[in-house]
Amino acid sequence: MFRSLSGRLLILTTVFVMLAEVLIFVPSIARFREEYMMNRLQRAQIASLTLLANDMIDPALEAELLRTAEVFNVVLRRNEVRQLVLSSPMPLTIKATYDLRNASALVLVRDAFLQLADTQDGVIRVIGAPVQDAGLLIEITMETAPLRSAMLDYGIRILILSAVISFITAFLLFLAMRAFLLKPIKGVVGHMQNYALAPEDARRIITPSAGVTEVREAEEALMKLETELTQALRQKERLAQLGQAVSKISHDLRNILTSAQLFTDRIEMSEDPTVKRMAPKLVSSITRAVHLCESTLAFGKAEEPSPTLTVVSLDHIVDDVMVSERLAVGDAKIGFTAHIPPDLMIRADPEQIFRVLANLVRNARQAIAATGQPGHISVTALDHPKNWCIEVHDSGPGLPKKAQEHLFTAFRGGARKGGSGLGLAIAAELVRGHGGALELVETGASGTVFKITLPKGDGTF
């Protein structure tokens, strides 16, 4: 119970109410002590006035007056004359004097708690102003034991009353919070659990009904979230079905196109000028179609395999990429350079890093070749304390604005006409598998720069 919100609310309410009662108890016990002593002063004043009215009062009556007033001596000051009006033997010496005429609240509180802490019986002198201006001052001596006993009795009654009020208040507040807050919250939790059983079922989406503004806002936010999630799950299911169909079509289409590619090899040997002129374009189109099918099938897999991390020479990987791309240049005037420290070793999967770099360099080569102008591609690497940075620079025309918006999104981030947009999406996924990041640093008329960041340690950089 104490771990629940309702249990903690009950405890906190009780504690805070008790704290409030304690703050009330402190001045009230001081006020009780003051009133107790003022009452004794008033009794003593009445007794003294009786004696003043009749100077020849009997000693037995005088003693009875002192017992009734619960004091030992009464001193009355009138007309600048200090007069011992009533007196009796005191069992103990006077241990303290309290003047109630000008005592501040702090002094009264302090004296009250000192009185409670003092367990030794004694006699105190109390000075006050007579009521109805019946003199300049009145002074009495009285025992501390009855005063302390009365204060303890009053304090215990106040504390018991405070405890009862605290528990009643806490219980009523608990019932109110349970009805207006806890019950609606449990209802929201129940809706969430019910929705989690079948999130595709739109009938399980919560309908806001709470009367409390904050809870209703939570229900409305939850309804919006569940609606969007249900729609996303339906879309995901449709996309999964579409992906399966596309994979099957791509598989069959790849086989057909591969056969067509074999026939185009023979067409290229034809002596017909028209055939010679059209054959390269046909071969290029079929090659792009085969590449698209292969990329679609590769992306359709559940996920890329986890990288097998080994310590490899980055210079050797970059050199392999450059060699393969130089062979694919053809007649285009494109230069390749690499600025890799010969002793730079990185911790990575060599096959996957090769695929990432090959994709970036191939995209740069194709972009430059499409312009028909000479160009240059360079790969540089830097060894930082926490990570390795690899940058691929090219002097191409830059990426189109539309391609930049969805650069690493499959089927949407194609940077060139006829591209599928899968290359950069797969490359980014491979880099993330290493705990790193692939990002576009800059692009424009002067060229494009991609940066690969690979962490050296636990994946943070």
Image (tube, helix red, strand yellow):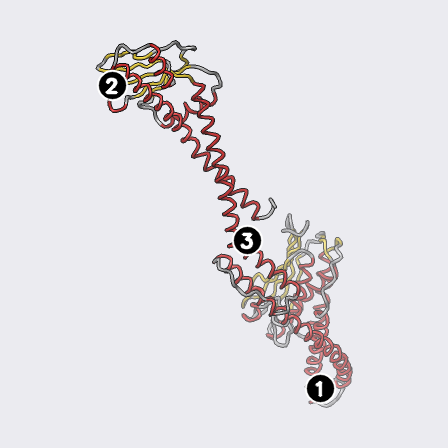
Labels 1 and 2: the sequence-earlier one: 2
Q: In x, y percent, where is residue 374? A: 61, 71
Q: In x, y percent, where is residue 436? A: 65, 56
Residue at mark 2: 135
Q: Nearer the viewer, residue 36 or 241?
A: 36
Q: Disc 3 to disc 1, how far (Cα)?
A: 81 Å
Which residue is depicted at the point 76% across and 54% down?
310
Above or below residue 286? Residue 74 is above
Q: Is residue 377 left or right of residue 247?
A: left
Labels 3 and 2: the sequence-earlier one: 2
Q: Is residue 81 left or right of residue 381?
A: left
Q: Is residue 40 left or right of residue 380?
A: left
Q: Secondary structure at mark 2?
A: loop
Q: Quadrant of residue 379?
A: bottom right
In front: mark 3 or mark 1? Answer: 3
| Residue 276 seen in the current view | yes
Residue at mark 3: 182
Above or below residue 438? Residue 259 is below
Residue type, mark 2 in image: Gly
